[in-house]
Image (cartoon, grey):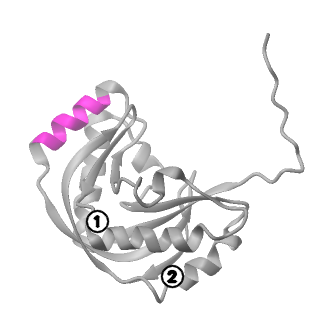
Amino acid sequence: MKSICIRNLNTPVNDMYLISLYFDEKTNSILQRYIDKVAKVTGNTFMTDHEVPPHMTLSAIEARNVDVLKPSFETLAGRLKGGQIQFVSTGQLFPYVFYITPVLNDYLRELSQTVFDEYSKIPETSVSRYYKPGSWLPHVTIGKTLTKEQMLKTLELVQDEFSPFLSEVTRIGLSRVNPHKDVDSIIL
């Protein structure tokens, strides 16, 4: 016997928003080149079709609308600074995502904690458990919705081409997902 779930139409539907880091032009060029090569080698063009820019998500927050998040985002403007990170490895979030990852240094740890502290106190919002301090895996996705075969082709590509690189974090952004759309940003 099938159960039927009926949603209460008076219950607001929350949207997902991201707080993400963006990088200097050299880093963007490196990361975009990987995204483009993954698309070419695998035929999986999810990242390019959806115009997902190179970014590292610090927090994923469910909220009824973006207006609830904007005041906290503006508060962060004076508290966050740019900094350096070093991308050192690649990895997979099985079964569909391939990423490049940095060292989780003190700078990233502090950014994560500051953003979490600011957004976790907003009523009627929910921070994803995967983006809470202590459970966050910093990464930049270069391939998404990959099949097993596409994942293997991506691994072969990065085995031949990846080498560690230093990056400058230059901007933090507030965006909506599906499709990715920037709402606001702060130059760091």
- Segment colored magenta: 150-159
Point out the residue furthest to the front here.
134
Vertical comparison of 84 with 150: above or below: below
- As measured in the structure, the alpha-carbon distance from the residue carrying label 1 to the one carrying label 2 is 23 Å
The residue identified by callout 1 is 28
Question: In the image, what residue occupies the spot 79% across and 10% down?
Answer: 1
Vertical comparison of 75 with 126: above or below: below
Q: To which quarter of the image does residue 127 belong?
A: bottom right
Measuring from the top left, give residue 6's x and y in whole percent: 85, 33
Left or right: where does residue 16 sit relative to residue 1? left
Is residue 158 rendered magenta in the image?
Answer: yes
> Which amino acid, by three-letter code, is at mark 1?
Asn
Question: In the image, what residue occupies the spot 23% across and 47% down?
Answer: 90
Measuring from the top left, give residue 37's x and y in whole percent: 25, 46
Along the line of sight, which residue is nearer the eye, 59 or 97? 59
The residue identified by callout 2 is 76
Vertical comparison of 185 with 108: above or below: below
